[in-house]
Image (cartoon, rainbow, N blue to C red):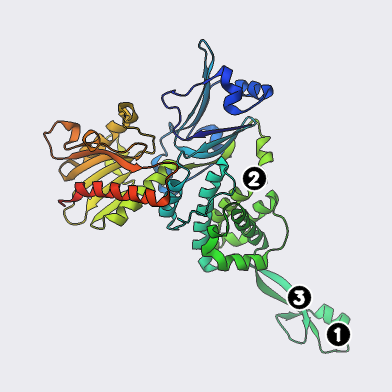
Amino acid sequence: MRISVPVNHNFYEEAPILESTLSKSFDVNKSGVKHLQKLFSSVYELKLGAEQLKQVKVLNFKSKRNKIFKEDEERLILKLYSKEKEEKEYYIQTGLYAGILFHKGCKINITTRYGGAFLKRMLNFVNDIYVDNEQIQAKKDETENQFLFIIAHLFIQSLEKVVVLGLPQQYQKQQERSQKVRGSINFSDYLKRDIPFQGKLTTTFRERIYAQEIVDVLYLALRKLESVFGKEIHSRLLGLCQLLKQQYSGCFVNYETIQKAKRHQSIYNPMYRGFKKVLEYAEIILLNKDLMPDYEKQNLTTSGYLFDIAELYEIYLEKLLSRNFPEWFVSGQVELPIYQKQFYHRSFFPDLIMKHKTSGKIIVLDAKFKRIEMQNRDVDRADLHQIHSYSGYYKNELIASGLIYPLSKKLNLDKSHSNSLYGNDNNNIGFIVDGIYVDENQTMDELIECENRFVKRMTQLTINY
């Protein structure tokens, strides 16, 4: 049974599923309806740091993120529950983690909501791999391909970096019978076979060879990506692909082979340490379909793969602003310590800080990967309090602050920009709710044009500095 739902879904309980529409909503038969009713019968809530996450791989785009949310145990991933009303209502809520979960025989696809040009564009900025070619897309329109597309880029980026030093190799003892002496002579063989001497000797020597399990896993992972997205997906690794093809053993990779590759002694060599992460991504790519039935049979534990879509959006904005504002330092997740001598000490982590290289003036921004249609409730009270807390920290250096969203409607500047913090006209600090207009069906060129409009609006904030 499969359920597909976007990130940040149903926050206000605005989309309940009525009991009478369960079969139609999930396209299931009567036994499927009973399974769903059982699934929603008790409240199931999965949060960051929960015990159930032990079998779930949470992937981050940068390690700093783990530190920031180390003490934050309240980040919602998924919540399933029901309410007794005139007609029973079923609810699915999601946070800002996208991916695939397996729970009680049900496969839950949490999608990014924006799976077209916008997802590709964010990955381009994060990985510095520009694959704007519209040909690079899944051959089948399946929701899990969105997750596979992201893992593919992480895999290719990581592989491209570590392969500079070559593929993992190890020494293996070899024997050779020839007229040349290579290594040491095998005297026992000599006494048995070479008296009288016939011109050939058996020698034993050590030779460096590629780690076969690792070669096989990498080769088949690239082949699988090629079958889903086309050859363009690994166009920057053509030389490596040829080498892997030559060294491939021809054997099918199963779960045991993947585990052997991940535990191979060669990757404990500091020179090849980066392959640990590459092999983790390769495992996800290969298991994504080939061995999925093993996961679907698990009824007792929640398993799967997730990534932080909010982090992806933050990094995208950070690099977009860095490219377009060279006179400013643009930093993500800067730590702002407060009350460090008191027992209630804390640290703030604003998503984006822009600091002018000459004047030292500051613009502080928070990236919010949430659907916004320019209604009052779209801007959460907690988000508004948070950005104003960051603004207060910088005092006299601050010239503007704001919240940056992927926009579902075009901006009305009079309603979304304020000339003063708090809107009370007793200061010259600007406050904005802004972002980049995103549509599921827009082309890459249309998205880039929307980026340019956003950059122009940001330029108005910085024009005097």
Q: Element under label 2? A: loop
Dot 2, how many residues are within 10 Å of its Cα: few (below 14), some (14-19), or many (20+)? Answer: few
What residue is rendered at 17% in x and 45% in y? 397
Mark closest to the chain's N terminus, 3 or 2: 3
Q: Which residue is labeled 1 in the image?
A: 194
Dot 1, how many residues are within 10 Å of its Cα: few (below 14), some (14-19), or many (20+)? Answer: some
Q: Which residue is labeled 3 in the image?
A: 175
Q: How many marks?
A: 3
Q: Element under label 1? A: loop
Instruction: Check residue 327 in the rendering and tell me which mark sits there, or answer none.
Output: none
Q: CA distance from mark 3 to mark 2?
A: 41 Å
User: Mark 3 touching mark 2, by CB under 8 A?
Assistant: no
Residue 386 relative to residue 136: left or right:
left
Residue 416, x across and y down, in percent:
25, 35
Q: Judge whether 400 appears above or below 445 on screen.
A: above
Residue 89, x across and y down, in percent:
52, 18
Which amino acid does the dot numbered 1 rest on?
A: Asp
Residue 319 relative to residue 430: left or right:
right
Q: CA distance from mark 3 to mark 1?
A: 16 Å
Which amino acid does the dot numbered 2 rest on?
A: Lys
**Which quadrant of the figure has residue 244?**
bottom right
Which amino acid does the dot numbered 3 rest on?
A: Gln
Dot 3, how many residues are within 10 Å of its Cα: few (below 14), some (14-19), or many (20+)? Answer: some
Instruction: Check residue 289 in the rendering and tell me which mark sits there, or answer none.
Output: 2
User: Mark 2 touching mark 1, by CB under 8 A?
Assistant: no
